[in-house]
Image (cartoon, rainbow, N blue to C red):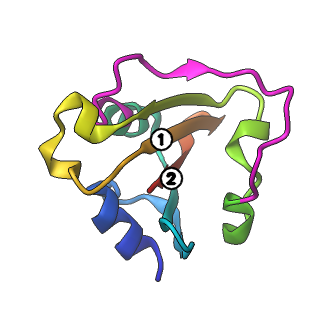
Amino acid sequence: MGAAEASTFMKVRVPEGAKEVKGAVQVNPQEDVYLLSFVTDESAAVRIAGELRSETPLRTRNHDLPPATDLFGHLGLAEPQTRKGARWAGVCPPCVGDKRRSAVAWIEIHVLELDAGNTRVYMQAF
């Protein structure tokens, strides 16, 4: 399974013209983790983050601690929590009344500006 399955589960449309589109599903005994990453422009990345309906906007997190799991390494990417300047938002879709994602217990996004015009989006959901 790849990017198509992950974006379908998350109900996220990868922007037209996005580059480096990667996805996977980590199968676990209790719940599978869906991963999706791509490079797009900053405005598209921020729009996608806004569509998650998080109660707090994208914000920078403390990057001093290593991530608890190595998820995006499976896609050949550094974990977003380790990247300086990465912004984050997360939400429980059923908790905010997002009926489009009623099967998703948690979805989060990391947005990292790579250079002028290119922003990497990392998403995970279960």
Give the magenta range: 49-70
Q: Is residue 118 left or right of residue 56?
A: right
Residue 29 in the image, given as x and y percentages of width and height: 55, 74
| Outermost left residue | 99
In the picture, the quarter occupied by the C terminus is: bottom left
Cβ atoms at labels 2 and 1 below 8 Å apart: yes
Amino acid type assigned to the residue bearing label 2 in the image: Gln
For label 1, the residue is: 108
Residue 107 in the image, given as x and y percentages of width and height: 42, 45
Q: Where is residue 61, by image quadrant? A: top right
Q: Residue at x 37, y 60 (%)?
A: 17
Return the residue nearer the eye: 118 or 67.
Answer: 67
Question: Pointer 2: residues within 10 angstroms few (<14), some, or many (20+)?
Answer: many
Q: Is residue 51 magenta?
A: yes
For label 2, the residue is: 124
Question: Pointer 1: residues within 10 angstroms few (<14), some, or many (20+)?
Answer: some
